[in-house]
Amino acid sequence: MNTKVETLEDSRVKVVVTIDAKDVDARIKKTYKQFAQRYNFPGFRKGKAPRPVIDNALGAEAVLATVSEDLVNDAYPQVIEAEGLFPLGRPEFEDTGLVENGKPYEFSFTVAVKPELELDSYEPVAIELPAEGATDAEVAEQIEALRAHYSVFEDASAATKLKPENFVDIAVVAKDADGNQIEGLTSESRLYGPGSGMFSEAFDEEIMGIKKGQVREFTLDVPADEAAVLLAPHAGEKIAFEVTCNVVKKKELPEVTDEWAKDTMGFEDAADLRERVAESITAQKADILPRMKENATLDVLASRLVGEVPESMVEEAEANLLQDFFTQLQRQGLSFDTYLMQAGIDADQFKDDVKMQAADNAKQELALEAWARHAGIVATPEEVSAEFVKAGLPDPAATEKEWRESGRLHLIREGVVRFKAMEDVMDKAVVTEVELAAEPEEKAKPKKAAKKKAAKDAEPAPEE
């Protein structure tokens, strides 16, 4: 079998495949025998009918059409593997006719392939990360959070006016446009902090400066996109409020003393509290810093990519993200509506997030492969085989053979290359440690897409 690959526009290639005449003849002979065994031909024992009889009974082109289809189906994955192509989507085959005895058979197809884009720089990436261990500022931040948790609210003097940093105990009467009282908003006593997100900024502006015993009456037109927790169910409505200030309150934080650390927190003393907080921060950082480094490195590397990412790649990445996401939901026993409610987003926001993450994943994938080509990083046959062993399959060698014969082995090979490229980029990264006043948190994103690819059949897919 000979192949000729021609590069076309828009990351497409045309492949011309020529199969030797002797292989064509052998396949025709084999197929005639199969037809003789498969069908009953009057006057002949099973498997003994000659070619003319088979042709007369089934049609002169029946066997040739079957051979042509089988040759194309068998050759396509072999060509993909031999030429190192990474197809995106389905191939388009040209009409090449039927095989003939004693003649080579030629067919051709065009298919979109993953482009080999370049980076505008192959210098080590420069990123910023929190220092390992716990800094004094981070320990102080965590202890402040503990103090806030155990804070108490003391009544301020009657002359104290409500300020943004204060809290207030208010009685609220809320009525709709028809004068009906809204039970979910009406309360004789509600502790409220301006800017907490329970009511809107417009509500806060109306009650700011109020003091004990004062009453404020006002009407709010709730916007259609209102996000405040208590007002969101009434988006688009007009609500009349009567707010009475029961008392302005000040938030008092406990002092970090040995007694407080022991009696309230259960530590030996304040020093023991700080030591335990530092240990907790150190452990959390050790857990999340590797992923933070990977994310930061990928973001920088992807920003260097030169060229456009094919839409088909983004669509495939989006499909993988959605498949992984809904599989996780099913395992956790959650409905999609429950997830949206817990995340505080709607379906449109979810779709936008997934599309954005899919585009990021596709860019990162191409950027890693560009780095790998520049650095000469490849996947050895041994490394590819090891992935099937890692997957815990009953017969790794047999599964690897199936993937090779079906033209899917490039998925594993590319996964190994990207993993090695990621390690190389991270090893060479120039890291600047930065001081954070708060405990570091991993950037919130939908799950990274293409760390694993699901097999198209019943076999579990090895990890990429």
Image (cartoon, rainbow, N blue to C red):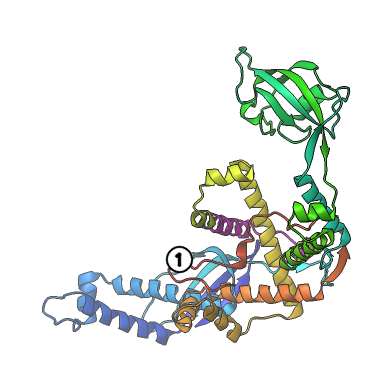
User: For residue 319: magenta?
Assistant: yes
State the predominant SS element of the stretch in magenta: helix
Q: In this view, does 278 lie above or below 193?
A: below
What's the residue type where badge 1 is placed? Asp
Q: Mark 1 points at which residue?
A: 95
Which type of secondary structure does the marked residue at label 1 adopt? loop
Can you tell which quarter of the image residue 169 is in? top right
Residue that extends furthest to the left in the rendered view of this protein? 43
Task: Evaluate whether residue 304 shows in this view.
Answer: no
- Count every numbered label the image shows and give the total: 1
Lateral position of residue 56 relative to residue 105, left or right: left
* Left or right: residue 229 compared with residue 196: left
Image check: 257 left or right of 351? Answer: right
Among the 4 quarters of the image, the one containing residue 199: top right
The residue at 83%/40% (across/down) is 252
Residue at position x 41%, y 76% in the image: 71
Left or right of 289: which side holds 114? left
Question: Which residue: 43% across, 68% down?
Answer: 458
- Residue 140 image point, x, y percent: 85, 55
Give the x, y percent position of residue 304.
79, 63
Q: Examine the rendered structure and indicate whether residue 265 appears above or below residue 3.
A: above
> In this picture, which residue range is highlighted in magenta?
301-327
Residue 92 shown in magenta: no
Q: Residue 268: x and y, percent?
A: 78, 61
412 or 179, nearer to the observer:
179
Residue located 79% across and 57% down the image:
439
**Residue 176 versus residue 142: which sits nearer the camera?**
142
